[in-house]
Amino acid sequence: MSQYGLGMTLAAPRLLLSCVTAASLAAAVALPATAAGGGGGDGDRTGRAAAPGQAGRHPGGHGKDLPKVPVMRGSGGAVSSVDQQASQVGIDVLRAGGNAADAAVATAAALGAVEPYTSGIGGGGFFVHYDAKTGRVSTIDGRETAPKSFTDKAFLNPDGTPVNFDKAVNSGLSVGAPGTPATWAAAVDRFGTRRLGDLLKPAERLAREGIVVDQSFHDLTAENEKRFAMFPETARVFLRDGKAPAVGTRWNNPDIARAYREVRTHGIASLYGGKLGRAVVAEASDPHTAPGVEVPRGQLTLGDLRAYDVVHRKPTHTTYRGLDVYGMPVPSSGGIAVGEILNLLESYDRRTGTSLSEVSNAEYLHRFSEASATAFADRNRYVGDVSGVPTNELLSQGFANERSCLFDADKAQPRPIPFGQPDGDYSACGTAKKTTGLPNDGRSTTSLSVADRWGNVVAYTLTIEQYGGSGITVPGYGFLLNNELTDFNFAPVQPGVPDPNLPGPGKRPRSSMSPTIILEDGTPILSVGSPGGATIITTVAQVITEHLDRDLALVDAIAAPRLSSRNGTEDAEPALLGSADGSALKALGHQLRESAVIGNAAAIRINGRDDFEAAAETTRRSGGSAMVVHPAR
Ligand code: GLU
């Protein structure tokens, strides 16, 4: 049990209950503000220690800054993200009368300034939106896209073997046409009330003012020192004398402020065919490298940028415990896989007559692992940016019933679990035989949730793929280019089995990002998302089930030790591995592998009209930042 709440064991109607505990609220009030903006002059990259008292006021806002806490309840709207300054930017937009889409865009842009290794102008993402006026959930697919010249051989050496993965990561070849600025423009245009240029101003200011380097920023920079050193512009912007800036010093990035200013004043057209776009193409196609370093060149052209557009897609939908779960469709596998996991769990509940809320924690985790591994078997076989992905069948309860028939309370199924046949005929049990290999996966990205007082809700997950993306910084503009195209499988993961995630011209690599909005009787009750590569899927599904089925307060569901079972790899955080539950899972045959940190979730529980509970990480990655416009007293 985390320090932030007590497990809820309250009686039904569970879903309508307020889920914040007295302990959580006390924590919200007690924790001090840390590392907020303020101070720090333009153009300062000296690394001087931050002066005391710089934390606190965030210039340009509309009221007092809120503290950095992992849970906050109140009214007026809510923002949850991984960063205090970014959440504050979103709250300021809500305070000033902006809506959820406005605040989500401003928060995301701020993250690009203060969390430059996980997202930014050079990346892409998925925006899921609930519109209170229409009652509809819709999505914006702002995924990075392969150049027109990209073929299924793009990541093969001349002898037909796959290019070394690290070599592909640190290269122009992996850079897809960025979709993030187009997503912002589309979100504001479709759902917002503010001008995009105005929503970018706080990010520009934060980039100039900079941040006080915390442990997480330091560690991520230190992990990347070697590859950042391959690219002189990246070393100049992000390193000091070749090293990560020290914790407690100030780091700023006036170059990215210039990039925001360029988009603010010339619109996203500057990226999609103009000055910024030319700078991106020049760097991706022939990256500047340190003496003696050679990296593969990219194929991105100005034509690819001109041709880029977001896609407005129908969300995935499944029902779970009578709730409506909406997620991100192809090219993400997130909505399909999260939905299938939930369907499998519900199906197995029915088969056994015991629901997830009634079983021991070890049995819950066992069921969760079996469901996750099964969903990954199907995801790896069927999901990619190709036509004819059987989304409806993969999300049908019939398919889940057939697929859960081999779950055994006494033992884990051997991995890899074969993929199923989503063919509409679900009478078979145990006939699946074929498996696929394991695709590569990383652990980066960022996610945020916003809800406003009018009832609109956003779940938005965005990325530049790896921490630090391709490692290539656009000269003079201070942002990292994505390496999203490494999310393609370089070669078929299983010879003889069709692979929907091979590279292709204008194709979008399969993603695991899973921004999710859940409705009860047509009204949103939960918005959730997480970073973490393929573990995003299991993190989101685990938070949902820990909260809805296991009766944990949302912040405790986020803090709970994570298990990520992906059909061949089963990662567990140390707190789980070393626990009685970990031992019980091993005794059932689960081959657990220790993983220090899984995910970094941000979520909002909507308890009723204008009653929000924002929740974020308590300790992972230095903790997240949950805020509401008017905190409850
Ligand atoms: N590229 C990953 C995806 O779209 C996200 C990056 C990561 O979290 O590693 O699924």
Image (cartoon, rainbow, N blue to C red):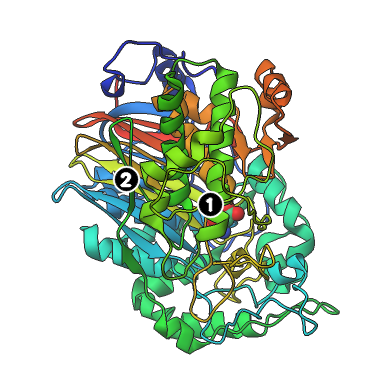
- Locate residue 284: give its quadrant: bottom right
At label 2, counting other C-alpha atoms closer than 10 Å, the crowd grade (few under 14, some 14-19, many 20 or more) is many
Task: Find numbered disc 2 in the image and state the secondary structure of the residue it sits on.
Answer: helix
Q: Please give left or right for residue 85 compared with residue 416 in the image.
A: left
Q: Is residue 618 visible?
A: no
User: Which amino acid is tagged 1?
Assistant: Asp
Q: Is residue 104 visible?
A: yes
- Residue drawn at the location 52% of the way across and 62% of the way down: 510
Residue 485: horizontal and vertical position, in percent?
A: 59, 70
Q: Which of 438 and 179 lies nearest the eye of the viewer?
A: 438
Residue 268: horizontal and vertical position, in percent?
A: 37, 75
Q: Earlier in the sequence, mark 2 or mark 1?
A: 2
User: Which amino acid is tagged 2?
Assistant: Asp
Label disc, if present, on residue 378 of the rendered structure: 1
- Locate residue 116: give its quadrant: bottom right
Q: Is mark 2 within 8 Å of ligand 1?
A: no
- Residue drawn at the location 57% of the way across and 21% of the way down: 363
Ligand 1: quadrant of the figure: bottom right
Q: Which of 149 and 528 lies nearest the eye of the viewer?
A: 149
- Residue drawn at the location 40% of the way across and 50% of the way down: 425
In this rendering, which labeled residue sits more in front, label 2 or label 1? 1
Q: Which residue is mark 2?
A: 92
Label disc, if present, on residue 556 of the rendered structure: none
Task: Find numbered disc 1 in the image and state the secondary structure of the residue it sits on.
Answer: helix
